[in-house]
């Protein structure tokens, strides 16, 4: 899959159901789009599609900050449940933090998030 | 190396570990770590009693948390499992009657922990790492170019300590001539008197005094400077959050940054040479594809687990995995065991430099106390190996390593090696 910016995850069901599309933008501007099943996290959508830029060292436990992303669109950001105390704290310790920073393991993919765009920081700490 | 002898030792250790009644198992024995004989004890605990109570040890009673996911659960529950230095701090030996505990942010709970941690984190931000990279590379090159060819030398002394002490001196903005003194102080902090590093407690205290004195001078120097430097001491001295902290608290944080920024990376550099020698097929793989250095570094950090444990103290009664942990109980998260948890990591005892998920290890801890310097540690390992591969076809281990007498710092005092030739 390397070199192909457009990575589509195939649905295993016989009658494929529309899956929310998430766009991931690497720090260098390279874009990746993936269809991510509802219920997955935005982090899983990246890791399972081998999209670089999200490390997810803790595997989705909100226990590190290596799946840090920026959600630029305020309308989209409003559709994501607010940060827990733990997410707030873990982000607080990470570099390059902005008000629209989120841990992508804490963003659950729903129909409402179809078209979500997340940008990644320079590096994951 | 005589691998047959090593295997015999492992079998003897396994027999000993399985012969004991479960409640008599005490993994917190520095000698087990020095002999590398702790593995079967942890293996048994993971299988038979993953949250284990040991009633008697040289450190008093304590709980052992041995499985990856349980460690994660304790590490991320800082509301219940406290790091407070007044409760005993973050090592199994902390809080004993004869000690006067040092405050440092790793041994604090929120909110103070968070405030102080944030003061020093910029030292390892992406921009600073970019700045440090070329400096570390130049030093690594010089160190490697000065090594003897065809004759035995101690890798710990000539490479691991040198490189990491140089980096640490830079982080403190200390003259490079003082780097070995800094490394020595780092060793003193965690060393048990009478086991190689230092002979008596009196000597330890005397060296500690000098350590304290030197860093008091540095503070006075930096705090009075009109312009704040980018080094750790200046950061502490000029940030309103830490500028007025008690001298003891300043020194505690210096101790933390010294040990955290030094022993761990040093021992993992040594561990990488040892692991590749014990697994020559992996060394071949690395030579064939140097791009594997990045994943080899993560795999080595898992395999080595340079800090064997972190300790917490329960600040309330809690039921955990069916066990009743009482308020005030000492809870030890054995990272060294979590990193060998066969239910989470495939073939955990094998060193596999291209394993699928090399970053899935617990060596940096998780939650609010997760290692601040993890990326700097990885950077140093990455660079030293890139420079090694440019220069030497092989580094050969020629004797069993001398391991540290500690249940906390899992490391090496000596690793004799030979470099047969240059590329």
Image: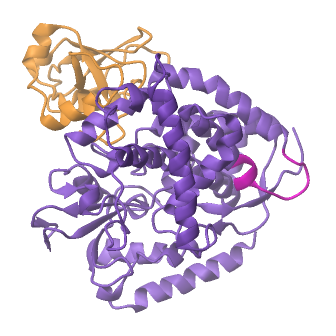
**Can the viewer see residue B81 in this picture?**
yes
- Residue at screen point 35% across, 56% down: B344
Q: Disc count in the image? A: 0
Q: Nearer the viewer, residue B273 or B226?
A: B226
Give the quadrant of the C terminus of chain B: top right
Q: Nearer the viewer, residue B74 or B288?
A: B74
Colouring method of the image: by chain
Please tell me in which quadrant of the rendered image residue B237 appears: top left
- Residue at screen point 53% across, 57% down: B208
The hue used for chain A is orange
Q: Nearer the viewer, residue A53 or B175?
A: B175
Pinpoint residue B345: horizontal percent, then vertical percent. Answer: 40, 55
Question: B96 left or right of B299?
Answer: left
Decide whether residue B227 is among the magenta residues. no
Span highlighted in magenta in the image: B147-160
Pinpoint residue B178: horizontal percent, then vertical percent. Answer: 67, 42
The hue used for chain B is purple
Give the answer, above or below, for where B175 lies relative to A114. Answer: below
Decide whether residue B156 is among the magenta residues. yes
Please tell me in which quadrant of the rendered image residue B105 appears: top left
Give the answer, above or below, for where B345 lies relative to B220. Answer: below
Give the answer, above or below, for where A61 lies relative to B14. Answer: above
Pinpoint residue A73: horizontal percent, then vertical percent. Answer: 18, 7
């Amino acid at each position: 899959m390397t070199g192909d910016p457009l990575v589509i995850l195939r649905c295993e069901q016989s009658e494929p159901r529309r899956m929310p599309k998430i766009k991931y933008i690497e720090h260098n501007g390279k874009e990746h789009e993936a269809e991510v099943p509802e219920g997955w996290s935005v982090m899983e959508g990246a890791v399972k599609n081998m999209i670089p830029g999200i490390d997810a060292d803790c595997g989705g436990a909100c226990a590190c900050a290596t799946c840090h992303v920026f959600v630029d669109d305020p309308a989209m950001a409003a559709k994501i449940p607010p940060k827990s105390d733990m997410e707030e704290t873990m982000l607080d310790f990470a570099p390059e933090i902005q008000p629209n920073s989120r841990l992508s393991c804490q963003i659950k993919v729903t129909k409402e998030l179809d078209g979500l765009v997340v940008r990644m920081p320079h590096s994951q700490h | 190396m005589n691998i047959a002898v090593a295997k015999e030792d492992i079998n003897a250790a396994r027999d000993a570990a399985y012969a004991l009644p479960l409640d008599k198992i005490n993994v917190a024995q520095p000698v087990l770590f020095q002999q590398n004989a702790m593995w079967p004890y942890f293996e048994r605990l993971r299988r038979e009693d993953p949250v284990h109570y040991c009633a008697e040890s040289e450190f008093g009673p304590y709980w052992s948390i041995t499985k990856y996911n349980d460690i994660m659960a304790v590490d991320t529950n800082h509301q219940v499992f406290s790091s407070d230095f007044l409760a005993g701090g973050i090592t199994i030996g902390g809080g004993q009657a004869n000690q006067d505990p040092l405050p440092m942010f790793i041994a604090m709970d929120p909110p103070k922990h968070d405030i102080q941690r944030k003061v020093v984190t910029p030292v390892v931000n992406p921009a600073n790492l970019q700045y440090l990279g070329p400096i570390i590379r130049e030093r690594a090159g010089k160190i490697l170019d000065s090594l003897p060819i065809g004759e035995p030398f101690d890798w710990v002394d000539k490479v691991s300590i040198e490189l990491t002490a140089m980096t640490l001196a830079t982080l403190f903005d200390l003259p490079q001539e003082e780097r070995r003194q800094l490394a020595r102080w780092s060793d003193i902090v965690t060393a048990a008197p009478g086991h190689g590093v230092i002979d008596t407690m009196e000597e330890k205290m005397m060296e500690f005094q000098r350590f304290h004195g030197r860093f008091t001078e540095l503070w006075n120097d930096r705090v009075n400077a009109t312009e704040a430097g980018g080094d750790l001491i200046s950061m502490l001295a000029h940030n309103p959050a830490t500028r007025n902290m008690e001298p003891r608290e300043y020194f505690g944080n210096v101790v933390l940054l010294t040990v955290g920024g030094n022993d761990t990376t040093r021992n993992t550099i040594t561990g990488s040479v040892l692991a590749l020698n014990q697994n020559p097929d992996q060394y071949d793989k690395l030579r064939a594809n140097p791009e594997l250095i990045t994943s080899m570094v993560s795999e080595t950090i898992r395999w080595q687990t340079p800090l064997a444990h972190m300790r917490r103290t329960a600040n309330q009664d809690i039921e955990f995995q069916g066990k009743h942990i009482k308020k005030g109980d000492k809870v030890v998260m054995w990272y060294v065991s979590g990193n060998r948890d066969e239910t989470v990591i495939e073939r955990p005892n094998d060193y596999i430099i291209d394993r699928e998920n090399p970053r899935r290890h617990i060596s940096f801890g998780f939650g609010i106390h997760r290692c601040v310097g993890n990326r700097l540690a990885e950077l140093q390992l990455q660079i030293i190996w890139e420079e090694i591969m440019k220069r030497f076809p092989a580094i050969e281990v020629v004797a069993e390593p001398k391991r540290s007498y500690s249940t906390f710092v899992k490391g090496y005092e000596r690793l004799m090696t030979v470099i047969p030739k240059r590329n």
